[in-house]
Image (cartoon, rainbow, N blue to C red):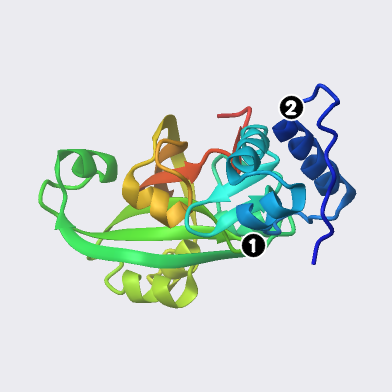
């Protein structure tokens, strides 16, 4: 059991700030490791001899500084350094994550067949009404949700794409099974918006937090569009790095 910490209530420093600085010092010293879960508010309140509201204020301040990360329904964690995510002609989630000594994975969270509307037909250079596979994915690094993505693919080119992705967790590997050995990024458009309820649940972030939105088109090596994606990334977990050549 953690020993109670005595605060100096005559120091002229707000109690919540003393708690904040104590926790920050413990994180810097390695007592709480990167990615580890902070003790519950009730336990910290007992440790510091304060009410939960005071603890909550300290945690909120550390979260605002990026020292802590609140995952909805899971707790509060010591924040990892943001993942550097290059946006360039070759953008591969698994390669990017593995290159930073983290463990990547992909999860299928939904799929459907739908007809191409005007936007999708334009992006994929297909006739209106062409049957598409819509794939909903969650990309994860070291067990931490990073990106929710919605991608559209021409069904006739990748008829078994949903099953292939579910098996491998990799867009690249699923495309290879369909005979598309390589591809490149045509363009990326980056904006921001407030997270909606569904994405907040998948990413484990509170409603109202910002997410980065990356809309992109990938081409096969002959220059034909094979994928249009709208990805939403947790803004405090990913740092987009735009290649100077873009």
Residue on which the image places disc 2: 14
| Of 240 and 109, the residue lying toward us | 109
- Residue placed most toward the observer, 179 or 165: 165
| Residue 1 relative to residue 168: left or right | right
Q: In the rendered image, which residue does mark 1 sit on?
A: 142
Q: Residue at x 37, y 47 (%)?
A: 229
| Disc assigned to residue 77 | none
Judged from this view, the residue extending furthest toward the front is 10
Q: Earlier in the sequence, mark 2 or mark 1?
A: 2
Outermost residue, top direction?
Answer: 12
Against 183, residue 155 (above or below) is below
Q: Residue at x 49, y 65 (%)?
A: 106
Mark 2, secondary structure of its residue: loop
Residue 190 point in image, percent of width and height: 45, 31
Using residue 44 as the reference point, say whether residue 195 is left or right of it.
left
Where is residue 246 drawn, in percent x and y? 55, 29
42 vs 64, nearest the viewer? 42
Residue displayed at 55% across by 66% down: 105
Residue 138, relative to residue 230: is it above or below?
Answer: below
Where residue 111 sits, quadrant-wise, is bottom left
- Packing grade of label 2 (10 A; few <14, some 14-19, many >=20) is few
């Amino acid at each position: 059991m953690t020993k109670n910490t005595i605060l100096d209530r005559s120091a002229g420093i707000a109690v919540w700030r003393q708690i904040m600085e104590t926790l920050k010092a413990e994180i810097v010293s390695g007592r709480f490791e990167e990615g580890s879960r902070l003790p519950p508010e009730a336990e910290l309140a007992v440790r510091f001899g304060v009410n939960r509201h005071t603890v909550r204020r300290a945690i909120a301040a550390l979260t605002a500084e990026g020292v802590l990360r609140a995952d909805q329904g899971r707790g509060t964690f010591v924040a990892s350094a943001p993942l550097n995510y290059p946006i360039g002609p070759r953008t591969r989630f698994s390669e990017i994550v593995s290159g930073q000594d983290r463990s990547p994975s992909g999860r299928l969270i939904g799929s459907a067949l739908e007809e191409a509307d005007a936007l999708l037909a334009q992006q994929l250079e297909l006739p209106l009404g062409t049957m598409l596979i819509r794939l909903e994915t969650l990309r994860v690094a070291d067990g931490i949700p990073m990106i929710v993505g919605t991608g559209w693919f021409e069904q006739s080119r990748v008829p078994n794409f949903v099953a292939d992705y579910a098996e491998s967790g990799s867009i690249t590997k699923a495309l290879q099974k369909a005979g598309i050995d390589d591809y490149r990024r045509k363009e990326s458009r980056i904006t921001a918006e407030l997270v909606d309820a569904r994405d907040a649940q998948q990413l484990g972030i509170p409603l109202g937090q910002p997410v980065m939105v990356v809309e992109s088109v990938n081409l096969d090596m002959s220059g034909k569009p094979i994928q249009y994606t709208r990805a939403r990334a947790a803004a405090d977990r990913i740092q987009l790095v735009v290649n100077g050549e873009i």
